[in-house]
Image (cartoon, grey):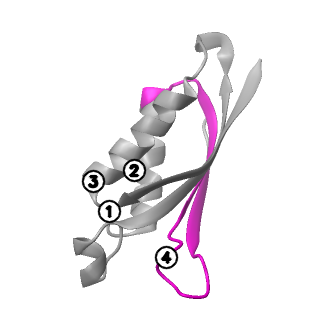
Amino acid sequence: MKFTIQLKDLSFYAIIGILEFERKIPQKIVINATITYEDSEGYIDYAKMAAYIKDHIKKRKFGLLEEALISTSTMLKAKFPQILTIDLAIAKPQILPDSTPSVSLFLKFD
């Protein structure tokens, strides 16, 4: 059977950005993830998944959202080999006064 995990509005503070002030002061980021997996290899603990995402992004202090997406997706697939697809988005709600920019990535594994 295939199942889908959705993590909506996973919010925390981290260093992501290339501007000088973004490299010094953690800013709020919001993660949304939709992950499908095959349960033949066991279930996925969504609480652990959320903790892995937060820890991974906080420790690495990425320059670009794109780098954070690729690295985080790679880490998730390594931790949970039963993942079939990852649809991951990272938003920075406080960086612009009149918009919430985000970047997303969709990966399908064979």
- x 54%, y 54%: residue: 31
Relative side of 18 to 11, left or right: left
Instruction: Provide residue 26's location: percent of width, then percent of height.
Output: 31, 66
Q: As shown in the figure, which amino acid type bears the numbered disc 3?
A: Arg
Q: Disc 2 residue type?
A: Ser
The image's mark for residue 60 is: 3
Which residue, given by chain and number where applicable, does mark 4 sit on?
Answer: 94
Q: Are marks 3 and 1 in contact (CB under 8 Å)?
A: yes
Instruction: Report the amino acid beneath label 4.
Output: Gln
The picture places residue 88, in percent across and down from the top left corner, at: 58, 52
Look at the numbered discs 1 and 4 and tell me whether their residues touch, using CB distance below 8 Å.
no
Tag 3 near tag 2, CB within 8 Å: yes
Q: SS at mark 2?
A: helix
Magenta region: which residues?
79-106
User: Marks 3 and 4, Cα distance to the nearest angstrom?
Assistant: 20 Å
Relative to 53, is 84 above or below? above
Instruction: Give the quarter of the figure containing the C terminus.
Output: top right
The Cα atoms of the two marked residues, 1 and 4, are separated by 17 Å
